Structure formats: C-alpha cells, structure tokens
Amino acid sequence: MSKGSWEIFTAENHSQALALLRQHPVDVVVLDLEMPVMDGLQFLRLLARTNPGQQVVILTGRATEENRKLCLESGAALFLEKLIAPEGFAVVFESLDMLANTAPQEGFRGMMRRVGLQEVLQMECLGRKSSVLEIFTGKVRGRIFVAEGDIIHAESGSLQGEVALYGLLGLRGGEFNLRPFSEPARRTISGHYEFLLMEAARLTDEGANVLEAAAPPPASAEIPTGEEFAHDLQVQDASPAPAGVRIEEMVLGSGSGEVLYDCKCGSVESRLKLLQRIEQHAALLSNMLPSGRFDRTEIIATEGRIICQVQPDMRLFVRSVTT
Amino acid sequence: MSGAAGYAFVRAQRDDIKYEPMRNACEQFFAAQLPVTGLAACGARLPDGMVIHQCFTRWLSPQQVRQAVAHLAQSFELLRQYQVESIRMAWVFEHLKVHMGLGPNSTSLFLFVENRPDLPPGEIQTVLEQFATLPVE
C-alpha cells in the first residue's frame, strides 16, 4: 500500500520489538492490544518510558470505548479498529502515513522517576532556554516558567513563587510536559537558578513538601490530559503566596574565588573565605572517608539556614530564613 | 618538665571523673536510639576531647570514624570564626552525609549516613533533636 515508501519491521512480542527499536528508530509503532507475555497497553506504557516521544498507534479488533480511553491516556497517538475489507486497510494506511509525515509536537513528555524535574530544569536553564514545565500528579498540578535560562515564575493551586517551585520540585512522582514558553500573568521568582534548585533539593531532603501536605485527596486516579490541565489552571485563583522561605544573603563565586554575583551580603570577602575553608576541610574528609565527591554543607544557625556549596568551577553561599 | 607532665595527668584524671556521666549518657543514647536506617557509623566527642564511636558497616573502619570525628569537631569552631553560630550541620558528599549536632555541655554528636534518596529524612532529625536535650545524671 505504501508503494515502497515505508520500511516495515515486524516483531512477535515486546522483547523483539524493543530490540528492533534499538537497532532501527522508526516513525510509527503499530501495536495490537493482544500480545503474548505483555499486552499492548502494558507495552504502550513501557514505550512511553523507554522511548519517550515515540509515536504509537493501537490497531485492534477489541475497539471498545474503555480500551480507546486507556490507550489514548497512556500516550497512543491513534486508536484504530482493525477492518477486514480492503478499503478499511486503505483508511488505516492513510492515517498511519499522515501520522508518520507529521512533525512531532513541540515539547516532550516524561516520567519524573526516570528523569528528575530538577535535571530537566537545569538543562533548560543551562541552555538559556525559554519554556513552561507543566507538572501533574494525582493530587497536585503546577507550572514552572523559564525565560532565557532564568526561573521566573511557578504556580500550583493558590501557591505562587518560590513556595510553589519548591513544592513542585519536591514531588516524588508524576508526569510533566515541557511546553513552549508563554509569559505568565506575573513574574514571582528572581533568584539565581542554581540557588533555587539547591534550596529545593535541601527542602526535599528534609522531607517537607507544602504541596503534598496541603493537597486534597484525588477526585480520581486518572491523570488529566494537557487540555484539562490547562483549563484547570485558568480557573484556579491567583491569591498571593503564603509564608515560605526568604533569601537573606547570597554570594556566588567562581572556582578561583572571583565574585560572580552577590545579594544583600554584608561581607562578601568573609563569606568567600568561609567557603574556601570549607573546601579545605572537605578535601581532608574526602581523604579520610570513602565518601565520594563533596557537594555542600547544610547549616542550621541562629541566623537562619545556610548552604555552602563548593564545586570545581563555582562556590555558593546562601542564607535563608523561614517566614 | 616532670611537673608539667604530672599536672596534665592529674587534670586528665579529673576530666575523666567530671565527664564520666556524659560518656555514660552518650553510650546509653547510642544503645537506645541507634542505629537508624542508613546509618553507617556514629560518634560523639566529649568536652574533654574524648571520642566514643560505633560502626554499623564494614566500609567504614573505627579508625576512620575516630579520625573524622576529631576533624569534624572543629567545624562548629570554624563557623564561629566567620560569625556563624550553628546548632546543627551536615557535610554532604556523593555517597555519605555526616550530620552533626550539639548536645549538653558542648558535647557533639556525629552521624555518618549513607547518601541515598530513599532514606527517611525525619529519623536523623529526630535523633539530633533528642541528643540536644540529652539528660545527664
């Protein structure tokens, strides 16, 4: 039917299919629902994790409404019914041909357990990109806005700003979509992205997530579609953020001790000197213990929480207080 | 010289007596509260500089723990030099986190914990908080 325009590979089960996909990237995967060992729906969900972005079409003789719903929600691009008549196959072919020749949508989908949100955000910021990261779990929904490598806004329910950002980055599982940038109603975050991500990591380590704690029980176990999600965000109220974390002081230095950025810091020199001493102590400890590479110290002090991070090419001192 | 050495010895003897209840309290605390999930070793430094420690894994030797505690004990003082009055702190490495907390009479507690994302964070905080208010007879 394709008149030689398609190259077709066939597989009898999921392991053969995975092996084929590793050897031959394809435009479209066509799956039956009835497969040995792992059924088509299970394999569709597996492909969503192992081959994110892969276009998958379900072609089945069991075209029930429930199957259609499950498959489309699990990432299938099309759900087609097997038709016996030759003209039926022509319709199927046209649909597949159209899909194979359609450029993939902008943005991608992924599972947080495989690719951390922080990693995605870090890549966006390092690449100086602009995008909107939509996040949704059974209980929590939110968006993080990145403009030219800076995290400029985050929102989740009635929370906005850093509180929403930290809450979203602390989620333990769910889904995200990386979408093209659109300007938020207002910009609520202005800190350096490295600090923001580090603070989020610290709060996650401490196990306190304001979003999960405040989230109501899920109305249903289903994950909303992108459209439902976008609609819900539009109708959510935009009241100001409640209490959260406030940065009191921050110094970012290069690996050689040059000041790259400072904010509200009384004595930049003293802070850099402290970072240098911490680096020395950490080097000694690394020699004593099978600890691996040093990352940071986390300090609870009378004047707030302090993070001193030392990397080969940068040093960071941040003091924050809980408001 | 002999007088100086004798003085040091006597002082050490007095400190031993003075800090014996603290040492007992720490050992009882270790026995009652530890280990917690992911804990590789623990140590405490008494006000006289004596270090008591315990290992729960093979990949950390008692000597390593003793050396590390002696070194880490300077951390609070280091911070104080830079006008940071710390109550608790953690040194975070790729595979290991060392949590430190202050107890009564400037005794300090050191918890060497595997750096694994699946470990419950609350347990360590609870141990450090309990140590801060450790009763000493």
Image: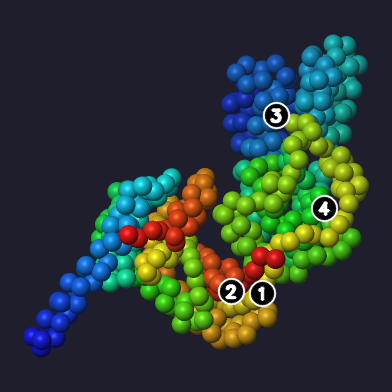
- Compare residues A195 and A110 and report the one nearer the observer: A195
Q: Which mark is residue A44?
A: 3
**Chain ID at mark 1:** A
Mark earlier in primary sequence (3, 2):
3
Instruction: Relative to A25, say whether B54 is above or below.
Output: below
Q: Position of residue B66 (x, y in %)?
A: 28, 63
| Chain of the residue displaying label 2 | A
Q: Amino acid at mark 1?
A: Glu
User: Mark number for residue A158?
Assistant: 4
Callout in the foreground (1, 3): 1
Residues packed near mark 3 inside 10 Å, few (<14), some (14 to 19) or many (20 plus): many
Whether residue A251 is visible here, answered yes or no, is yes
Q: Name which residue type carries label 2.
A: Glu
Q: Which residue is mark 1?
A: A248
- Measured in 3D between alpha carbons, the distance from the residue under mark 1 to the one under mark 2, in whole angstroms, is 10 Å
Foreground tag (3 vs 2): 2
- Check disc 2 and report the residue beneath it: A303
Q: Nearer the viewer, mark 1 or mark 2?
A: 2
- Of the two numbered discs 4 and 2 on the same chain, state the one appearing first in sequence: 4
Q: Secondary structure at mark 2?
A: loop
Nearer the viewer's eye, disc 3 or disc 4?
A: 4
Q: Residue furthest front?
A: B137
Chain under numbered label 4: A
The answer to whether the residues at label 1 and label 2 have Cβ atoms under 8 Å apart is: yes
